[in-house]
């Protein structure tokens, strides 16, 4: 690890961290707070995915829909209008909308194999964006003069690494350039995330074998054909299983770094608070190791 003790962290002139864990537990909140402090560079993996690596896919999909409208088709064909996505750190809707959900086309569903193609595009984009992290650590300091760096990773980071492989390329690159920090939720957080997702189900990325197994099980359990699956019903059903699937993978990743609790993160109000939280987590790790 970059920092072996709480004192190492406190004394470090350059602090570099990567936050990971379930979406909705505070990664982006903390990243925004640190950025607003003025001396932290905020690198959002999801933003990088949606702009650098999947921006063209997203824009082309929007144009494909626009081409079905005669009025917009004419304007597009004459280069009279421009269509693009307006992704921000806090609004990733263009990316999630492009990923889509499989099922009944009359309810906005995608054919399952088209859905899997988009899932694979996301996988490749997420891997590339994560491997860009060390370069952005250097870029933040050398180009912009930021002494500190926070990487706000997506909830699906555990789906594109092998956390049990000590030589995993992605995790090695990340842990060489940043302290990995798991924001760990408890059962109450998990239940609240499921309730929140149930109210507004959204597209997500899943590891391919897990997703294919979930799809086959859903079709058999509910006696559906691919064309009659309610897209929202499927992603709701899959989400709770995904959280259970991800938890041990996050825990394995955390062996390379430190763990903080979601309730601790919720209490952070300033960069100074966060620095003390990381120092406490490093002290806990050192105590647990003795």
Image: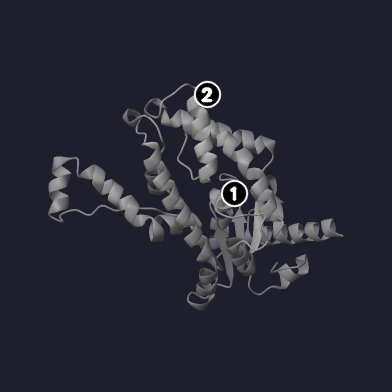
Residue 18 — which label? none
| Residue 138 horizontal side relative to residue 16, left or right | left
Q: Residues within 10 Å of mark 1 (few under 14, many from 20)?
A: many
In percent of width and height, residue 253 lies at 66, 54
| Left or right of 171, for residue 145 | left
Residue 191 at x, y percent in the picture? 62, 33
Q: Percent position (x, y) of residue 136?
A: 51, 69
Residue indicated by mark 1: 26
Give the mark, 2 or 1, whose residue is nearer the N terminus: 1
**Residue position for label 2:** 221
- Picture quarter with the N terminus: bottom right
Query: Hey, which quadrant is residue 242 in on the image?
Result: top right
- Residue at image position (65%, 60%) is 180
Mark 2 vs mark 1: give the one in front. 2
What SS does tag 2 mark?
A: helix
Res. 236 visible in picture: no
Residue 99 to residue 123: above or below:
above
Q: Residue at x 56, y 52 (%)?
A: 157
User: From the viewer's perspective, is 37 left or right of 124?
Assistant: right
Q: Give the position of the C terminus as an image quadrant.
A: bottom right
């Amino acid at each position: 690890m970059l920092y072996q003790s709480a004192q190492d962290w406190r004394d470090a002139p350059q602090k570099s961290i990567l936050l990971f864990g379930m979406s909705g537990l505070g990664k982006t909140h903390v990243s925004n707070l640190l950025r607003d402090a003025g001396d932290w560079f905020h690198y959002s993996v999801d933003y990088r995915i949606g702009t650098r690596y999947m921006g063209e896919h997203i824009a082309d999909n929007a144009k494909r829909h626009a081409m079905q409208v005669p009025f917009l088709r004419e304007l597009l064909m004459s280069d009279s209008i421009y269509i693009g996505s307006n992704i921000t750190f806090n609004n990733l809707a263009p990316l999630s909308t492009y990923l889509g959900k499989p099922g009944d086309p009359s309810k906005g569903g995608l054919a399952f194999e088209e859905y899997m193609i988009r899932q694979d595009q996301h996988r490749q984009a997420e891997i590339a964006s994560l491997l860009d992290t060390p370069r952005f650590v250097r870029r933040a300091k050398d180009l912009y003069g930021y002494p500190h760096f926070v990487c706000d990773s997506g909830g699906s980071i555990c789906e594109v690494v092998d956390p049990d492989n000590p030589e995993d390329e992605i995790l090695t690159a990340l842990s060489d350039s940043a302290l990995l920090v798991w924001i760990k939720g408890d059962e109450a957080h998990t239940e609240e995330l499921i309730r929140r997702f149930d109210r507004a189900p959204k597209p997500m990325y899943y590891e391919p074998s897990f997703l294919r197994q979930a799809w086959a099980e859903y079709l058999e359990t509910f006696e559906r054909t691919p064309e009659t699956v309610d897209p929202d019903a499927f992603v709701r059903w899959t989400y709770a299983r995904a959280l259970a699937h991800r938890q041990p993978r996050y825990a394995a990743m955390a062996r390379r770094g430190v763990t903080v609790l979601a309730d601790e993160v919720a209490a952070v109000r300033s960069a100074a608070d966060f620095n003390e939280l990381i120092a406490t987590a490093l002290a806990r790790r050192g105590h647990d190791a003795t």
